[in-house]
Amino acid sequence: MKKYTKKYRNIADRLIEKSFPELRGKSFKIVEYNFTKTYGGFVPIINWLGIHKRCRNFSKVELEGLIVHELCHMKDFESMNFFKTLLWGILSNIPVFPRKKLESRVDKRVVKKGYARQRVGVDKKFDVEHPNSYMSADEIKSYAKKIGKW
Ligand SMILES: [Zn+2]
């Protein structure tokens, strides 16, 4: 287990160093989990970045796409106060929550950061638990081209 979280930590640290100046020095924990169909998740307040055990065989590009997406969630929560964070943290985890707006905003941020290709690389894996909540590979590609980030 340690072996994998260590690998994820290295990737996350590198991504933060390169593309998330606002998250430098922020303390968070990377954990593995083995429930739900999701591939990754971020729990605000306790600041846990979770990666599902099934991601152990992901390629480097896929892991980057996944981790960048979660770092963008982290960045999203950074800009909220405690109560808003708490509210969103709870609401966004109930099954009927309309995720589309939240996830699209995060995916657009992933593209703006310059990780459209990594995000497309992991595209199929995102839609398992929350179908139609994420930008599709085509949407990501055309948005990236539009803003000159492809
Ligand atoms: Zn997400």
Image (cartoon, rainbow, N blue to C red):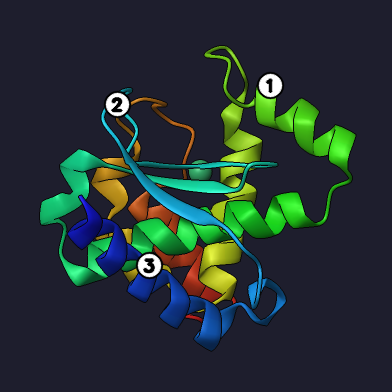
User: Looking at the image, which residue is at 57% across and 12% down?
Assistant: 96
Q: Position of residue 78 (x, y in %)?
A: 76, 56
Q: Amino acid at mark 3?
A: Arg
User: Looking at the image, which residue is at 56% across and 76% down?
Assistant: 113
Q: Position of residue 61 (x, y in %)?
A: 24, 70
Query: Which mark is in front, 3 or 2?
Result: 3
Residue that numbered label 1 is attached to: 91
Helix, strand or loop at label 1? It is helix
Q: Amino acid at mark 1?
A: Leu
Residue that numbered label 2 is attached to: 37
Between 99 and 60, the one nearer to me in the picture: 60
Residue that numbered label 3 is attached to: 9
Tell me how far mark 1 sits from mark 2, CA to CA. Answer: 18 Å
Q: Position of residue 146 (x, y in %)?
A: 56, 74
Q: Which quadrant does the C terminus fall into?
A: bottom left
Q: What is the residue that sits farthest to the bottom in this orientation? A: 18
**55 to the left or right of 30:** left
Residue 150 appears in the picture as rendered: no
Query: Which mark is in front, 1 or 3?
Result: 3
